[in-house]
């Protein structure tokens, strides 16, 4: 099977969508022997700058291509916005990458058996229409984030432009051969967008439970932070952007009657503002750190006694935080901010792996945090429940293996129809 994946996010980007793109492609090569080519751009997320090793490369005529874990990675140079980010900057990023990638497809000679497009950007659907015409193969449109809906509800787009983009999105996804997404809430939204009421297939994110597991013994990160075994560490790890609402976590920590350490690991457009907020709140036990390297991820996540995933109410149902699965895999409990009935709340309750608090309420979040901070046994029970749930339902072999079977069936059906 020759598979082409199109996304402007891939390794060495460490977290979120690029993490899952990278793990999926490597798994398909390693376990099934597929020939996978990734068509991507400049590494930039979540730092919103290009690492020096990639910034100075010559990308003309494929000179910037490389092979990562037996996956061929074809890169194009494109515009990368700097913080602070806004809707227009993101649109320029999307358009720049799509245009450069389109130009490169004009000279492509090897025909894949199937193509997978990752959204965002939502306009990758336009690229998909061209690829259908160019190669006459099935195209899968996989939605990791409802980009247009999120931008509208977070106030990043003017009203007149919002309607135009929603109309374009509906027209594009209706032409794809298969539509997949990562959560039930996002699937419902996509079904509503499709006038023909086509089915949308659930293809959730996963955890590599063999590689990401609870770390045993002395933890190097706790030693580096100067934290004793009796002190409690709350960890937020991931992107620091507008959707996350990390400032609610900072305000909640300032309300705790019992002191605890807060570690915020990540990069993003709002990091400088978060550091300023922490100083204004006089938080003494807070550390801002970079993300841990992939090979140390399990030990890094295990360094915390509990994790927190804050989420703005406006983003509920539009994104599903991918970091939840690795938290569960290392056997740590999590406190999330989500309304009842949302995918994030339902996932935590189904697994029994943590606490759910009202979004955008520092008082509610502080109450949920202190419930776990003071109760070591409760933390242990919820952490074990999360590990068990992800092993049984969301391991990489089951999830990606199931997607590979569906993709193989799609290719066989397409060949039959063509014949």
Image (cartoon, rainbow, N blue to C red):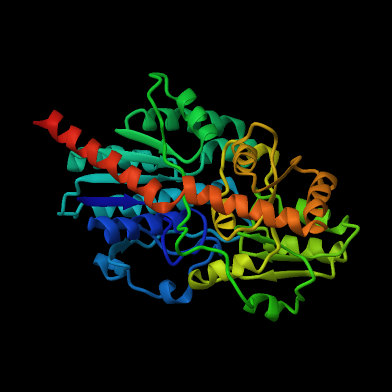
- Residue at the extreme right of the image, as rendered: 257
118 shown above or below 11:
above
Residue 286 in view of the camera = yes
Q: Nearer the viewer, residue 35 or 172?
A: 35
Q: Nearer the viewer, residue 6 or 90?
A: 6
- Residue at the extreme top of the image, as rendered: 196
33 shown above or below 59:
above
Location of residue 198 (image quadrant): top left
**Which quarter of the image is occupied by the C terminus?**
top left
**Residue at the location (19% across, 50% down)?**
1
Residue 176, horizontal then vertical, whole percent? 32, 33
Q: How many marks?
A: 0
**Residue at the location (46% across, 25% down)?**
191
**Residue at the location (18% across, 38% down)?**
136
197 shown above or below 321:
above
- Residue at the extreme left of the image, as rendered: 419
Residue 195, horizontal then vertical, whole percent? 42, 19
Name the side, left or right, on which 357 lies relative to 205.
Answer: right
Q: Nearer the viewer, residue 37 or 148?
A: 37
Residue 322 in view of the camera = no
Location of residue 130 (image quadrant): top left
Residue 25, horizontal then vertical, whole percent? 33, 56
Residue 74, horizontal then vertical, whole percent? 30, 62
Name the side, left or right, on which 296 lies relative to 248.
Answer: left
Location of residue 307 (image quadrant): bottom right
220 shown above or below 367:
below
């Amino acid at each position: 099977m020759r598979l082409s994946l199109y996304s402007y996010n891939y390794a060495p980007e460490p977290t979120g969508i690029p993490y899952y793109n990278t793990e999926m492609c490597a798994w398909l090569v390693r376990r099934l022997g597929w020939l996978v080519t990734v068509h991507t751009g400049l590494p930039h997320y979540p730092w919103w700058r290009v690492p020096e090793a990639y910034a100075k490369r010559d990308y003309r005529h494929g000179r910037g291509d490389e092979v990562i874990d037996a996956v061929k990675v074809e890169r194009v140079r494109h515009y990368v916005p700097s913080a602070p980010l806004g809707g227009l900057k993101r649109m320029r990023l999307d358009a720049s990458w799509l245009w450069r990638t389109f130009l490169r497809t004009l000279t492509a000679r090897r025909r894949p058996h199937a193509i997978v497009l990752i959204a965002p950007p939502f306009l990758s659907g336009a690229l998909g229409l061209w690829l259908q015409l160019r190669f006459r193969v099935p195209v899968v449109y996989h939605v990791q984030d409802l980009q247009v809906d999120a931008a509208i509800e977070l106030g990043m787009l003017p009203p007149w432009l919002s309607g135009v983009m929603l109309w374009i999105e509906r027209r594009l996804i209706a032409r794809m051969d298969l539509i997949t997404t990562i959560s039930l809430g996002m699937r419902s939204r996509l079904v509503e967008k499709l006038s023909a009421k086509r089915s949308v297939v659930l293809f959730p994110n996963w955890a590599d439970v063999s590689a990401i597991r609870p770390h045993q013994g002395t933890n190097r990160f706790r030693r580096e932070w100067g934290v004793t075994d009796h002190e409690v560490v709350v960890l937020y790890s991931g992107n620091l952007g507008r959707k996350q609402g990390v400032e609610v976590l900072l305000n909640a920590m300032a309300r705790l009657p019992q002191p605890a350490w807060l570690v915020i690991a990540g990069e993003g457009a709002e990091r400088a503002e978060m550091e300023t907020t922490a100083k204004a709140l006089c938080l003494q036990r807070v550390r801002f750190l970079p993300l841990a390297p992939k090979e140390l991820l399990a030990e890094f996540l295990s360094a915390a006694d509990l994790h927190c995933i804050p989420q703005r109410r406006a983003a509920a149902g539009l994104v599903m935080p991918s970091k939840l699965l690795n938290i569960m895999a290392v056997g740590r409990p999590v406190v999330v901010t989500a309304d009842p009935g949302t995918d994030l709340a339902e996932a935590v309750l189904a697994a029994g792996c943590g606490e759910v608090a009202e979004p955008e309420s520092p008082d509610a979040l502080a109450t949920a945090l202190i419930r776990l901070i003071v109760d070591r046994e409760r933390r242990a029970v919820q952490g074990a429940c999360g590990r068990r749930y992800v092993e049984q339902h969301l391991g990489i072999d089951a999830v990606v293996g199931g997607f590979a079977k569906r993709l193989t069936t799609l290719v066989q059906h397409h060949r039959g129809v063509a014949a």
